[in-house]
Structures are given as C-alpha cells and as structure tokens.
Amino acid sequence: MSAELLRHVNGLVADFAAEYGEVDLVGRRVECDPDEYDALLDTFDTFGVIGGAGIRVRGDDRVLLVRYADADGWVDPGDGRRPGESYRECAVRGVRETTGIEAAIDDLAQIHLLYMDDWTGREPLPNPYVSFEGPVQHGDCRAGDGVAELRWASAVPDDLLYEELTELPLGNG
C-alpha cells in the first residue's frame, strides 16, 4: 500500500474533523478479490482518487434509502469519486444520479473506512466513504442506473446494508 494513500486518508479525516469538530469514524473490513484490490490501488496511483460519498437525505420525518441491484440491503444514496471531484461534489452528484433529486449538505454523518482485504495476505487497503446529511432541495424521485429500488423510510428497515444505519433518527421497522 502506498504511503501517499495513507496520507490522503489521514488528511481526509483531519480535514473533516477540523471543519465539523467531531467525526464519527467507522472502520470495518470488507472481503474483496485481488483484482478489486488492485483496481482500487491502481485508480488511486493513476488518478489520485479513492473512495466515495453520499447523503442521508431527509424529508418530512423520513430518510431516502436505495437498494442497489447488486446489494443485499438498503443504504443511503451515493457513488464512487471521479477524478478531480471532492467528496461533497461526489455526494451531490451520486444522489442526483441514483435518485433524480438534488439534495443539500448541512452536516457530516459518518466517515466509513472500509478496509478492503483480499486473500493474498497484503495489508488491507483503506477505501473511505463519506456520509453526509441534508435535506431535499428539489426534484422527483426515480431510480437511476444500477438502482433496484428507492424508498422513503419513516422507520428503520430490518434489511440494511450496514448496521450503522440503525442509528438513523427514525422509528424501528
């Protein structure tokens, strides 16, 4: 793993901590195959880009959740970063492309450090995902490419993609 990648991830966390005062940092290992690991590392080495971002979109005491076609549960909408794109820009674009709506960012929910771990024995590769919070600005909900379903949830569904979403400020479903 490159020292530059570690500096990027440490800088990301430090920058958000300086801006928001406190960061809810969540780390977990994610099993991946060696090709996926190599692709992440190559993308960072080539373009300086890793990770992604999304927004926990609020509206009328509900939160917008998506179920991606290749996923086993509900999650907040977002996408992977593109070259030259900030985490905020990624989050806004990701929500627009996956849901059809424009959302504002008014807070930081969590930073997830997904440690990509393949079976080769290499050191796990940090792949940050920044989860913001914010309200709907405008637009009509529609499922974008790769999205199986959209749902405005007023209660936390049982089948979430990751357990930290149980902390959403909703009732239990």
Image: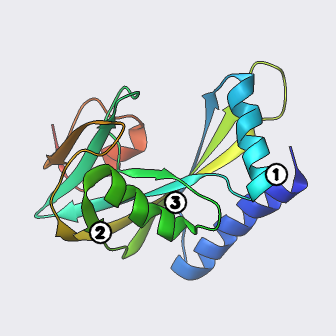
The crowding category of the residue bearing disc 3, from other C-alpha atoms within 10 Å (few below 14, some 14 to 19, many at least 20), is few
Q: Nearer the viewer, mark 3 or mark 1?
A: 1
Q: Alpha carbon of mark 2 to alpha carbon of mark 3: how far?
A: 21 Å
Q: Quadrant of residue 47?
A: bottom right
Q: Is residue 1 visible?
A: yes
- Mark 1 lies on a secondary structure that is helix
Kind of residue at badge 2? Ala
Find disc 1 in the rendering and name its residue.
45
Label 1 near label 3: C-beta < 8 Å? no
Residue 113 image point, x, y percent: 62, 48
Q: Quadrant of the C terminus?
A: top left
Kind of residue at badge 1? Asp
Is residue 166 rendered to the left or right of residue 118? left
Give the residue furthest to the front: 145
- Mark 3 lies on a secondary structure that is loop
User: Between residues 64 and 79, which one lies in front from this camera angle?
Assistant: 79
- Residue at image point 66% right, 52% down: 50
Give the residue furthest to the bottom: 19
- Residue at image point 13% right, 49% down: 154
Query: Looking at the rendered structure, which numbered label has been put on residue 103?
Result: 2
Q: Alpha carbon of mark 2 to alpha carbon of mark 1: how far?
A: 31 Å
Q: Is residue 117 visible?
A: no
Label 1 near label 2: C-beta < 8 Å? no
Q: Quadrant of the N terminus?
A: top right
- Mark 2 lies on a secondary structure that is strand
Kind of residue at badge 3? Asp
The crowding category of the residue bearing disc 1, from other C-alpha atoms within 10 Å (few below 14, some 14 to 19, many at least 20), is some
The crowding category of the residue bearing disc 2, from other C-alpha atoms within 10 Å (few below 14, some 14 to 19, many at least 20), is many
Give the residue furthest to the right: 3
Q: Quick check: 80 above or below 67?
A: below
Query: Looking at the rendered structure, which numbered label has been put on residue 24?
Result: 3
